[in-house]
Image: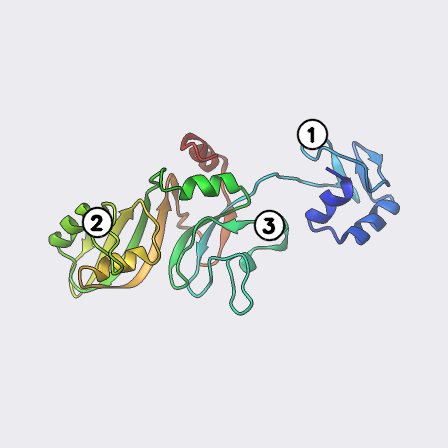
Amino acid sequence: MRIDKLLANLGFGSRKEVKKLLKDGAVKVNDIVVKDAKQHVDPINENVTLNGDRIEYKEFIYLMMNKPPGVLSATEDTREETVIDLLELEDQVYNPFPVGRLDKDTEGLLLITNNGQLSHRLLSPKKHVPKTYFAVIEGEVTEEDVKAFKNGVTLDDGYYTKPGDLVILKSGLMSDIELTITEGKFHQVKRMFESVGKRVVYLKRMSMGPLKLDDTLELGEYRELEDEEIQLLKEYQVI
């Protein structure tokens, strides 16, 4: 990779600003000053420094966010805040994107990455990746609902869902449940409950495949995946 492209991609300035840094002798590769913007470097195996500080380069970035309500699961929007807007600039420079979507008013686990292969495999219908949600339901959720979800229900557009694993945590006029599904149709959880005459009033995704939401993350907070979590994704054969 060209040294000027590397520095610009990592947010150290425009190409013009990076060329000035190079001209001023601020950049070294393996302790040798580099002034030629066209010089190619291997940022993984070579020691690149800027003003004495080593530049950390990662090909891929994997972030776990506890998505807050009111924020779009999108890379950009002209009117509303997106999950990418919540990232620090040092993470935005990797041009990451959310893996799948959570509704605007839905909270919880959202994986953000720049690894397109991972995103494709996690979202592929062939993979049947399980996603578990916690929800508060207006209306009493019953064992009949559990059976209906286990068999699959018909949504408002006639689509017949794959089986869902519904667990009743608390039943009453307002019921607490957990639901695990292997699909990701538009507003699917809400529409599944609408099919049995009930309404979702709160929804939070707790897990996706082998990843579980870090319960220490406040709404809107995020962190990089730990090595153990990345290993789980490898064992899951999505990276």
Pick whichever of labels 2 and 3 is earlier in the sequence: 3
Answer with left or right where residue 163 lies relative to residue 67.
left
Q: List the residue tagged with mark 2.
A: 166
- Residue at image position (56%, 49%) is 96
Q: Residue 76: give x, y in percent of width and height.
A: 55, 60
Which is more foreground, mark 1 or mark 3?
A: 3
Within 10 angstroms of label 1, few (less than 14), some, or many (20 or more) residues?
few
* In the image, farthest residue toward the bottom: 79
Q: Residue 130: give x, y in percent of width and height.
A: 32, 43
Within 10 angstroms of label 3, few (less than 14), some, or many (20 or more) residues?
some
Answer with left or right where residue 152 lies relative to residue 62.
left
Answer with left or right where residue 191 lies relative to residue 117.
left
Q: List the residue tagged with mark 1.
A: 45
What amino acid is at disc 2? Leu
Foreground of the two, 57 or 198: 198
Badge 1 marks a residue whose secondary structure is loop
Q: CA distance from mark 1 to mark 2?
A: 49 Å
